[in-house]
Each structure stands twice: as C-alpha cells, then as structure tokens.
Amino acid sequence: MGVCGSLLLELRCIFTEHALVQLTEKAEEIAKDLNLHLEAKDIQRGELEHFQRHWANGEPVIVSNVLENASGLSWEPMVMWRAFRQITNTNFEQQLEVKALDCLDWSEVEVNIHQFFKGYKDGCFHGELWPKILKLKDWTPSSEFEKLLPRHHVEFPCCLPFKEYTHPKSGFLNVATKLPKGSLTTDMGPKSYIAYGVAQELGRGDSVTRLHCDMSDAVNVLTRIAEVKLTEKQLACMTKSKQRHHEQDQWELYGISSKDKQNKPSDGSSDFSSCNKQSSDKVGFQEGEVIVEQGQDGCSSQSGNNLVREFEMEVSGKIKIVEESRDNGRSSETSANKIEEEEAVEGGADWDIFRRQDVPKLQDYLKRHFREFRYVHCRPVSQVFHPIHDQSFLTMEHKAKLKKEYGIESWTFVQKLGEAVFIPAGCPHQVRNTKFLDNVKHLPSPM
C-alpha cells in the first residue's frame, strides 16, 4: 500500500487464523456455567426472547423479587392454617392429621397439622439434641388447593414472571391450557410442602428435596424465611453425632473399624433410635414439644442457630416457593425458643441443577457409588432401580468426587427470598433447605 514518501505499509494480523473461532468457543465455555438472573421489575417485553434463548438451551433462569408483583398476602404457615381452618370448619376434625416425612430416616409419620406449624415456629429436636426435620407431604392436596386456600390460589399466579408460559389458565404459550378436557396429564399442581431444616449439612437428616427430574418445566418461588438459633450444646451434639455417622459409614462401606467399638453397628442401623421407627409412628406436639409416640425418643423445642423451616406448594404447571432465615451471628437476649425473622435475610435454599447432556455421566456415577447412599430407616441402598428416579442426595463430598471422576458439575446457587427459579424439564436437580421455609411449586407445560 502506498504511503507518503517511498515507504510501503505492510498490514499484519497479530492473531492466528482461527483466533476468533477459539475466542468464541472460550466465551461459550465460560458462559455455560452462568444462568440468566433477572429482576422482576426490570422485565420488559424484549426479555421474553432473552428468556427463550436460555430456555431453549436447557439453562435455568432466576428472577428476583417476584413477590413485589403480588398484593402482599402472607404465606406464613399460621396465616395459611387460619385460612384453611375457616374453610374446613364443617369437617375440621378430619383435617387435623396429615402425613409427614422424618428426614432422618425417611419414614412416614402422622402429625397434627396445627401442632406441626407450632413446631415450624419454635424448632424441634430429638432426645440427643439432633435436629428433628419433618416435611409435610402435599398439604394441601393440589386438587383441593383452590377450594381450601382460594385467596392464595389467586395470588400465586399474579407474582409469576413470564405469564405467557406460567399462567395456569391464560398463558397462551402454556401447552397445558390448550389440552382438551379429560386429557390424561401429570399433576400440575399447585401442591404444598412444609419442612424444617438447618444451615449445616448434616449428612443424615438434612432437609432436602432429593435428586429427581420433573416431567415438565417447573418454577419455584421462595416466599418467606424464619430462623431458630442453635445453642452451643446443640451444636456440640450435632458435631459428635456426625462423627459417629462417619465412623459408621467407614465401617459399613470399607470395613474400617472405629476406635469406639460402640459406634460400630452390627445390623446397618443408625445409632439414633429414631432411625428404626416404623412408618406408622405418630408425632405429637405439646406446648413446645414434639413427642414421638409408641415409645420413641422425645423431641424438645429448643433455640437454634440456623434451624430451617420449609413450606412448599405446587400450583398448576409447577411452582415452588421456599422461605428461610439465616443466623447473622448476633447474640439475642430473647427467649431461646424465639425465632429471629428479618426482612433482609439472604438465602434459604441451596440448589444444584445438572445439565441434560451430563445425565449419562451422572447416572454412571450414581450406579458406581450407590452403596454410599442411605434411604429409608437410614439403611444403605442395596440395589439400583434407576439412578435418577431412586432419588439419592449428593453431598458436598459426592459433588467433589463427581467433578474429579467425571469432570461434570451442576449449576449451584443459593435461592433468596422472593426469587423464582425456573427449572427446565429433563434437568436433574436437588435442593437443600438451609432455613425453615415456605415453598410453592408450579409445573408449567413444556416451553
């Protein structure tokens, strides 16, 4: 190229021939570990296309502060209990006993619904000060949600973003609204789940939703958070019990003997007597206490550091709402049973969502390590029927091993108060509640 004077200007490229392609690939590799995170108030018309681009790739989407779009109706369990009681006063006695899961051994127990809500408020522990984690199953049933909690049934769709997909009746992109009457469909909700939980990962008895896949897309909204603080005595008991559990696992899985021979079980059962409860056990609550009937350990209401409560509900399509409170480290002069409720609480549930393309490797890992998991009555899993649908739970240790052995990891994030989490169908996911939570879950149709 000619220039002023007799010199020539030679154009050169400082990048290699395929630099742009390589740069694009690196950017995509970094971006695949990120999920779309939006503010509900900032969602404009153009954001639907942005949402669809992520959704088409099977990526989760998080929308913050969705409750700002609602009327302010309380999802606090006792408020819902009073609304439920007003509707069901004609056959009130028949509605008192409900089914719950004891997360320590995953056995089914009967519980008085009103007393369960009191336990949600005050906290609950086994006789050895190990947190007692209960989860209500399908309260209220999705088929009766509109009838028993009509105001909440109307309120819930109002707070959901992207109503083109999520509205159970008028969402024009919601395939479920187009099906003919009488069509055979999955239970789209809403369903309710209420559960206790703690911030510390226990290894056994954690308040969790185990690894599973939903049949359709789902959205989960965290509605409320509260906290019970643990005493030093309770924390010390938890640490000691977790060590005994670890020693038991080492013996049962690898034949490694513990120094304390008393901790080595001969039949694979847990060192907690509650791990041997039968599914017909009944849990009763009396003035701040939880009594396991039929001669089982009592459960006293205690103060707590990061004790969690969860309340979940599923609506048509699937929507899940979780609430939690977190220990902020400050001392309290109030009663040991008092729950600290703060408006500025951060996260309430720890999420792991796996990519669809990683499912084969995830299944292979679960089949390879299935004996390391426990299920009903704390007994080790003895057989694999389906790696995902058997519903194991991956602890921090398991997730580290999964990454080391197979090179895959999940989208991991903490769900905060008022956040809606969109989960694509076909993506295995699990949740650990780090607080006492209220949760509502809705299953929209495939998007």
Image (cartoon, helix red, strand yellow):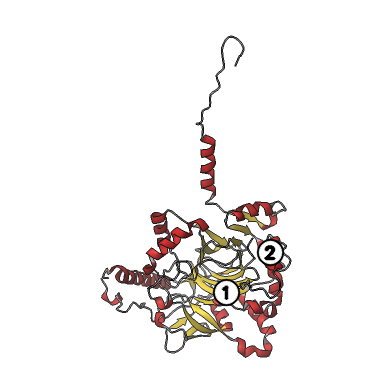
* Percent of width and height locating residue 71: 72, 67
Q: Which of the two residues, 359 or 264, is positioned nearer the viewer here?
A: 359
* Percent of width and height locating residue 250: 31, 68
* Percent of width and height locating residue 197: 50, 71
Residue 72 visible, this orientation = no
Q: How crowded is mark 2: few (under 14 residues within 10 Å), some or many (20 or more)?
A: many
Q: What residue type is labelled 1?
A: Tyr
Quarter of the figure that contains the C terminus = bottom right
Q: Which residue is label 2 attached to?
A: 174
Task: Spot the residue most to the top.
Answer: 6
Q: Which of the two residues, 271 or 356, is positioned nearer the viewer here?
A: 356
Q: How crowded is mark 1: few (under 14 residues within 10 Å), some or many (20 or more)?
A: many
Residue 193 is marked as: 1
Residue 330's place in the image compared with 280, above or below, is above
Q: In which quarter of the image is residue 117?
A: bottom right
Q: Which amino acid does label 2 sit on?
A: Asn
Q: In which quarter of the image is residue 202?
A: bottom left
Q: Is mark 1 on a helix, strand or loop?
A: strand
Residue 35's place in the image compared with 378, above or below, is above
